[in-house]
Image: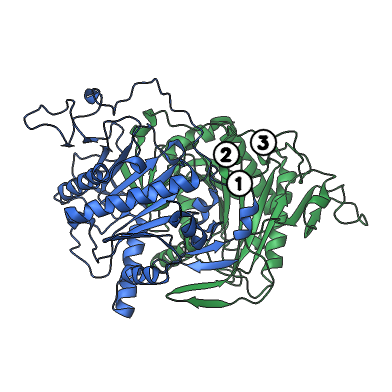
Chain colours: A green, B blue
Amino acid sequence: MELRKDPIVDRWVVFSTERVSRPFGFIPDSHDYDSHSFCPFCEGNETSTPPETLCFGRKEGAPANGAGWSLRVVPNKFPALSMGGALKRVKEGMYDAMSGIGASEVVIETPTHDLTLANMSVPQAAQLFSAVKERFVFFQKSPELKCAQFFKNHGYMAGASLPHSHSQIIAMPLVSKLLGEEMDGAEKYFKDKGRCVYCDIIADESGSGERLVYLNSKFLVTTPYASRFPYETWILPTFHSSQFEQTHPNSILMLADAVTQTLKRMTVTLGDVPYNMVLHTSPFHSNQKGYYHWHLEIFPIQGKEAGFERGSGFHINSTAPEQAAVLLREAI
Amino acid sequence: MELRKDPIVDRWVVFSTERVSRPFGFIPDSHDYDSHSFCPFCEGNETSTPPETLCFGRKEGAPANGAGWSLRVVPNKFPALSMGGALKRVKEGMYDAMSGIGASEVVIETPTHDLTLANMSVPQAAQLFSAVKERFVFFQKSPELKCAQFFKNHGYMAGASLPHSHSQIIAMPLVSKLLGEEMDGAEKYFKDKGRCVYCDIIADESGSGERLVYLNSKFLVTTPYASRFPYETWILPTFHSSQFEQTHPNSILMLADAVTQTLKRMTVTLGDVPYNMVLHTSPFHSNQKGYYHWHLEIFPIQGKEAGFERGSGFHINSTAPEQAAVLLREAI
């Protein structure tokens, strides 16, 4: 048994490998999405989503919101946040609130109903990250928006309402707590040592190889030293960059390679488990920072959620990242 | 749509009540625990747990680890942390680790296999909190332990491996991230205003009544202003106290009343949903603090977990706490 500290934020994780002996594993999503029910994300059903804000693949001159696309971005029909009205800060007795200005969009990653991101070709998957980049560039023009969160829920247990491969972007008037903590932790490390902590992690992990899952010419995939969850992976650009939306198209292809490689390996190792993928990148208008380094985090979801972690902020992980890395590395 | 800030920690929650129109509700735990399988927590099966560290209800002179008890505390067979060896801090390359010293115990709350905490009498439920208090007093004698976490997972989806009503105590050589943040936030508020933020919340919530669920002579139950999860409740002593283990036996009875009232109301409103209950209390040896205020937090678990929150630290809540409070308040 060992406690490990995350090198960026002040978070300790308990590694309790004895717990592996419990029947506490990953199970494929048991939820049956009704395969006969209408899918608003399929080609031909474009009118059942709000009008698209971005589309790839449609022939020039073809009308918007028709068939013939390879990727669409549409506003979320059930938005968490939406634009309209000015940002207002309110005091409610002893409490603070602000109006929920922002945007919620859905990226429909493919017209094919049952093609998962894990099974996409690299150019297909690259479309997703190009679309996210374009929408980030668009959202940062709005002076009231501070940052955007890109995330993907795969599988019912991970929060996906529909099985058709999609992901989400939420643009927000504030910086999420965890991102704020990461920015602070990375800045502190930089002030202490004069180096980016993520660049140090990349040097360390590509050197030791113990927690290395995959490496291509631009991206490293690693199971982090203080992984909160079994088989948690981080995908980091090996070059220093604090803002995802500045990523060059060539690097986006290499990112798509790293992501599909990671998901394929995860599927081989754990089965088609539900997972969340979350992009961590600098807030808008923060310029290129020397100390922060954007990356993607992927967490497979276990069949049963040890929700205690939600209430305590305290994580117990049954799988050493070194063990997870071996299995993921050797899966293909 | 509205964003609300937690008054203690720097955490904003998006309230997206439009999302209620989605079929995204609470579902009873669909997992069938095998009702014919052997239960190590039932009376008569005492030898299938490690030897008890505390027992209530057994007749004087009766041998330990036999039948005739009303509550037992036993070491966890699959401990997250355990005692033995000195606490060692290690540097692993750029990373920090320490040996996983601590303790993991299970409180078997009743000898009756299918009696839930929600359905216990007040004296039965009070036993649980008396036991937790005794074990906290015991653990704080160990100089290497900094704090203990008491939590309960009810239902498979909430992380309970066995259906027989039980809860857990983990004693740790460090303070969890979330507790550290709460202590810091509460201290800052105290320095600014000279008052305990939780005492202010109690005054505000018992005054307005908008988010009030239940109130007895010693405890207030409220749905917090910036609830992260639908139907999240906090149970706070109305008197200022920073350390749970200093609670007087009379107050423990009133706590048991508040907890069972809350769980009964939750069950009437949402069905027998899985939930987590977590105690937030000061670290050991921190003396009685003017600024921190112990309390219990309860989170019902929705059938499908929006795990994105885990990776982002960003919460979207579909149910206003004012709406949850009305339903919980009027449930009985």
Picture quadrant of residue B59? top left
Asked whether A26 or B323 is in front, the reply is B323
Mark 1, other Cα within 10 Å: few <14 / some 14–19 / many ≥20: many
Between the residue at mark 1 and the residue at mark 3, the CA separation in whole angstroms equals: 15 Å
**Which residue position is annotated with label 3?**
A33
Asked whether B247 or B52 is in front, the reply is B247
Return the x and y of residue B52 as percentages of the image width and height: 18, 33
User: Label for residue A274?
Assistant: 2
Picture quadrant of residue B243? bottom left
The disc, 2 or 3, on the residue closer to the chain's N-terminal end is 3
**Which residue position is annotated with label 1?**
A153
Return the x and y of residue B224 as percentages of the image width and height: 43, 62
At 41% from the left and 23% from the top, the residue drawn is B35
- Amino acid marked by disc 3: Tyr
Q: Mark 1 vs mark 2: tell me if same chain.
A: yes
Pick out the residue farthest to the left.
B61
Instruction: Choose mark 1 or mark 3, whichever is in front.
Output: 3
Mark 2, other Cα within 10 Å: few <14 / some 14–19 / many ≥20: many
